[in-house]
C-alpha cells in the first residue's frame, strides 16, 4: 500500500453586513426580510441599463480583513465581469475581481503551521433559488433579496495537510472576521460558506497531484472535517487501483456521512472575464489607505498574547468567550477592573466559561460582573494558628484518609479540605488549607 498525504486548498465566502448592498442602495438584510424580493431595484434585479455603484464600506472592510490576514494590498484595483448562466444570476454575469483583487499574499497561523492566503477579493452574491412543490408540480422560485449582497472570498494556497487543520483554519478565519465586526458569519443561513479542494499526493512526490476534487457548500466545521476524511478514503481507493479520481465538484450528505458527485469539471465554464465598463478602477489613495489601517483594531493574536502575559489567562480559555470586536474591548475592560480589585482574572474567565456567574455576558457593566465574581471569592479572615487545631482534629478522626494520602492517593485531599472547612464553618481558600494540611501530614 502506498502512503498518501492529503493536500487541501480552501475557498471561503463571507457575506459582509454593510447596511446597503454591493452595487445599489437596497437594504442588505436577506435573513430578516419579511418577504422575498422586497429589497430589490433595477440594479440588483439585473435589469438592462441599470448602473452599479460600488459600496465604499464593503471595499474598506475587505481591505481591513486583508490587513488582518497579513495581506499586501493592491492600491489600484478593479471589478470584472465573470460570465456564466444560472437562473439566480439575471445579468448573465457576476461582478467579481479577476487579476487585481484588493488583497493578496497573506497568511493564517494554525497549530500545524502557517496557511498561505492567495487572495481576498470582493464580489456580489447571487439570488437564492427556492425549490418547492405547488399543485403537485415541482417548481423553482427566485428570491433576489440576497442578489448583490457584498461577498468576500478568501482563497488559500494548497497548504492545508489534514482535516483537523482545515477545520482549525476555517474556525480561525471566522474568529478574525467576527472580531473585525464585518460579518456575522452565520453558517446555517449561508452567511459563511466553505469549500475545500482536496487531492492526495503519493509519498515522495514533490509536484501537486494532477487532479483535485472540489467539496462545495459546506455549512459547518464538523461537516468540513468529515467530508475531507471521507474524500481521503475514497480517493485512496481509486489511486490504489492505479486510476486517477475524476476532477469534479462534490457535495456532502451529513445524514449518510458521504460525499456525492454534483458535476464534473470537464464542462468547466470559460468565464470570459473582462473589466466591468460600468465601474471605474478603484484607486486607494494614501490618505484613504491610512484611514482604513487606523480603523483596524489590534490584531487578535496580539490581544490574546497581551491577556496571556498581563493576566496569566490561557488563550484556549479566552477564545471560548470570544467572538467580535466589541467583545474584545468588553473583555479587556473587564479584565482590567478585575485586576484592579486584586482578583484573579484566570479564575474569573474559568467561571464565565463554565457559566457559574449570574451575569449577562457582554451586556452587563464590567463593575457588576466583578462584584458577582468577588462574592464567590470572599474569604473570611482566619489566621493559620486558629486553623491548626481544626486540622489536627480532622486528621485524627480520619486516619484512613491520611494513610491513603500518604500512600499516594492524593485525591483524598479534596475530602480532607472539605472536612476542615465544615469544622471551621468559614470560607477559606482551598489552596491555603491544602498547603496547611499537607504540611501537617508531612510533619506527623
Ligand atoms: Zn438593489
Image (spheres, helix red, strand yellow):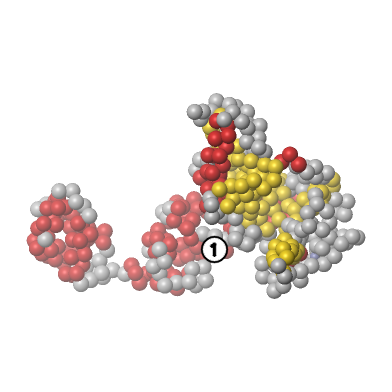
Query: Residue at the spot x=15%, y=48% of the render?
Result: 407
Q: Is residue 396 left or right of residue 299?
A: left
Q: Is residue 44 left or right of residue 203?
A: right
Q: Quadrant of ligand 1?
A: bottom right
> Between 255 and 154, which is closer to the camera in this rendering?
255
Q: Visible in this render: residue 125?
A: yes
Residue, far front? 136
- Residue 100 in picture, x, y percent from top left: 77, 44
Q: Is residue 363 above or below residue 270?
A: below
Q: Is residue 319 above or below residue 196?
A: below
> Between 86 and 417, which is closer to the camera in this rendering?
86
- Residue 189 in picture, x, y percent from top left: 63, 62
> Between 256 and 42, which is closer to the camera in this rendering?
256
- Residue 409 in picture, x, y percent from top left: 19, 51
Q: Is residue 318 left or right of residue 281?
A: left
Label 1 element class: helix
Asked if ligand 1 lies within 8 A of label 1, the reply is no
Residue, far top? 204
Query: Residue at the spot x=57%, y=64% of the render?
Result: 326
- Residue 178 in picture, x, y percent from top left: 59, 58
Count all numbered tags in the image, as a single digit. 1
Residue position for label 1: 327
Query: Residue at the spot x=21%, y=52% of the render?
Result: 410
**Quarter occupied by residue 354:** bottom left
Q: Visible in this render: residue 78?
A: no
**Quarter occupied by residue 416:** bottom left
Query: Residue at the spot x=69%, y=48% of the render?
Result: 120
Classify 10 Å Cα crowding around label 1: few (below 14), some (14-19), many (20 and above): some
> Between 175 and 341, which is closer to the camera in this rendering?
175
Amino acid at each position: 500500500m502506498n502512503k498518501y498525504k492529503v493536500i487541501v486548498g480552501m475557498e471561503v465566502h463571507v457575506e459582509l453586513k454593510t447596511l446597503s448592498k454591493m452595487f445599489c442602495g437596497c437594504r442588505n438584510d436577506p435573513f430578516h426580510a419579511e418577504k422575498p424580493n422586497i429589497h430589490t431595484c433595477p440594479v440588483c434585479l439585473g435589469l438592462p441599463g441599470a448602473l452599479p455603484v460600488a459600496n465604499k464600506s464593503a471595499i474598506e472592510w475587505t481591505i481591513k480583513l486583508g490587513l488582518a490576514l497579513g495581506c499586501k494590498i493592491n492600491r489600484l484595483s478593479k471589478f470584472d465581469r465573470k460570465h456564466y448562466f444560472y437562473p439566480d444570476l439575471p445579468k448573465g454575469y457576476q461582478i467579481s475581481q479577476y487579476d487585481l483583487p484588493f488583497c493578496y499574499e497573506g497568511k493564517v497561523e494554525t497549530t500545524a503551521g502557517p496557511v498561505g492566503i492567495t487572495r481576498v477579493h470582493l464580489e456580489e452574491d447571487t439570488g437564492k433559488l427556492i425549490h418547492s412543490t405547488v399543485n403537485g408540480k415541482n417548481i423553482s422560485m427566485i428570491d433576489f433579496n440576497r442578489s448583490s449582497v457584498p461577498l468576500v472570498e478568501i482563497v488559500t494556497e494548497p497548504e492545508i495537510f489534514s482535516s483537523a487543520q482545515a477545520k482549525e483554519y476555517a474556525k480561525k478565519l471566522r474568529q478574525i472576521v467576527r472580531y473585525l465586526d464585518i460579518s456575522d458569519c452565520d453558517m446555517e443561513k449561508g452567511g459563511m460558506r466553505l469549500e475545500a479542494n482536496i487531492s492526495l499526493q503519493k509519498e515522495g512526490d514533490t509536484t501537486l497531484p494532477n487532479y483535485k476534487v472540489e467539496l462545495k457548500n459546506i455549512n459547518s466545521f464538523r461537516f468540513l472535517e468529515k467530508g475531507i476524511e471521507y474524500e481521503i478514503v475514497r480517493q485512496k481507493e481509486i489511486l490504489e487501483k492505479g486510476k486517477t479520481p475524476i476532477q469534479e465538484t462534490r457535495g456532502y450528505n451529513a445524514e449518510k456521512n458521504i460525499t456525492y458527485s454534483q458535476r464534473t469539471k470537464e464542462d468547466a465554464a470559460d468565464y470570459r472575464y473582462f473589466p466591468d465598463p460600468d465601474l471605474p478602477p478603484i484607486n486607494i489613495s494614501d490618505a484613504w489607505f491610512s484611514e482604513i489601517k487606523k480603523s483596524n483594531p489590534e490584531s487578535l493574536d496580539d490581544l490574546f498574547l497581551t491577556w496571556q502575559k498581563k493576566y496569566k489567562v490561557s488563550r484556549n480559555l479566552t477564545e471560548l468567550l470570544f467572538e467580535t470586536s466589541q467583545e474584545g474591548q468588553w473583555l479587556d475592560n473587564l479584565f482590567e477592573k478585575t485586576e484592579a480589585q486584586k482578583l484573579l482574572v484566570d479564575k474569573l474567565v474559568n467561571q464565565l466559561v463554565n457559566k457559574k456567574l449570574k451575569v449577562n455576558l457582554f451586556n452587563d457593566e464590567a463593575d457588576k460582573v466583578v462584584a458577582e465574581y468577588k462574592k464567590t471569592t470572599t474569604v473570611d479572615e482566619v489566621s493559620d494558628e486558629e486553623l491548626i487545631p481544626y486540622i489536627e482534629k480532622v486528621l485524627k478522626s480520619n486516619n484512613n484518609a491520611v494513610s491513603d494520602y500518604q500512600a499516594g492517593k492524593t485525591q483524598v485531599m479534596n475530602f480532607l479540605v472539605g472536612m476542615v472547612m465544615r469544622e471551621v464553618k468559614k470560607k477559606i481558600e482551598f489552596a491555603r488549607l491544602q498547603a496547611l494540611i499537607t504540611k501537617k501530614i508531612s510533619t506527623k
